[in-house]
Image (cartoon, helix red, strand yellow):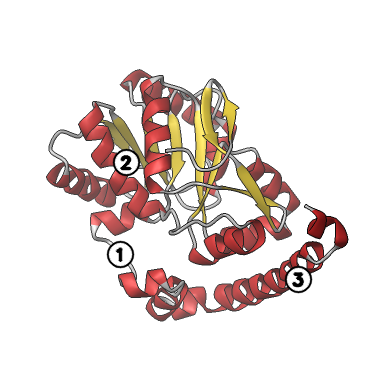
Amino acid sequence: MAIGNCMESNAVIWPVKRTVFGVGVSLTDYSDLVGRVIVAAKQRASAAIDFMPVHGLVTAARDPQFREMMNDFDVVAPDGQPVRWSLNMFHRARLSDRVYGPELTRRLCEAAAREGVSIYLYGSSPEVIDKLRTRLLEWFPNLMIAGAESPPFRPLTSSETEQAIERINSSGAGIVFLGTGCPRQEIFAHQNRAKIRAVQLCVGAAFDFHAGAKKMAPKWMQSRGLEWLFRLLSEPRRLGKRYLVTNTTFLALFAREWLVTLARRGSPSAAAD
């Protein structure tokens, strides 16, 4: 189940990370991460897991505060194909696939139903939460959903946050899916990791996708790293500027890192290794 070496956190072993543009990204795949999360969830271990697309990687590379927070997560999975390609190019990771948040959500719910681990759904709108809960139980009748709620679309007060933590902990859930959007879900997971006795996974749009509120890109576009294009065509006005800036910045960062990697591998010390 393990990929390469591992590092230990809170008595649970999580995948090792490798740096891409200053951001630590975990060397993991679907079966590896599902297995580790189930082990941690059965122990009610506190952990924070994020799924890193290109937009998130570029944001973390340019924002020191966000990068510091991401590097403190237990797992930062390579959600975007270009993120996986970067790991393979710069660190020879040999990852055969990315770890896409919505797909990991589905696989983890299947494993949780089989292993008797309860989950908690936190995020999105009340309508989406209701549809998501119904859809998950249709797919996995034995899945135990210990709680499901839609928080207010505004910053929570400290009292509201503490009440949410209490509801999650008292539910007995070993896995918490967060779907409040980036960076809100990451901030919540990071700030409350020590208080929530469960594995928190920031899965974002997985709620909307699995509830049927939004469409996912076709498989062939996903495998070729073209999911951004599908989303751009779906919401051009909202996402046009974001992808223009993000994709251009990613290509520039990738080119710079590629040149550095070529120089390093061509150095006498590298040849001696």
Which residue matches tag 3? 256
Q: Tell me if I can see residue 151 in this picture.
A: no
Q: Nearer the viewer, mark 2 or mark 3?
A: 3
Which residue matches tag 2? 108
Q: Distance between the Cα atoms at labels 3 and 1?
A: 35 Å
Element under label 2? helix
Left or right: 97, with 10 as reference point: left
Q: Nearer the viewer, mark 1 or mark 2?
A: 2
Check disc 1 and give the amino acid type. Answer: Lys
Check disc 3 and give the amino acid type. Answer: Arg
Label 2 with label 3: CB-CB less than 8 Å: no
In the rendering, at what x and y percent does residue 199 appear?
44, 31
Q: Nearer the viewer, mark 3 or mark 1?
A: 3
Left or right: 53, with 44 as reference point: right
Q: How many marks?
A: 3
**Which residue is pictured at 45% across the width and 26% down the height?**
165
**Nearest to N terminus: mark 1 or mark 2:** 2
Element under label 3? helix
Element under label 1? loop
Check disc 2 and give the amino acid type. Answer: Leu
**Quadrant for the N terminus in the image:** top left
In the rendering, at what x and y percent does residue 168 appear?
38, 26
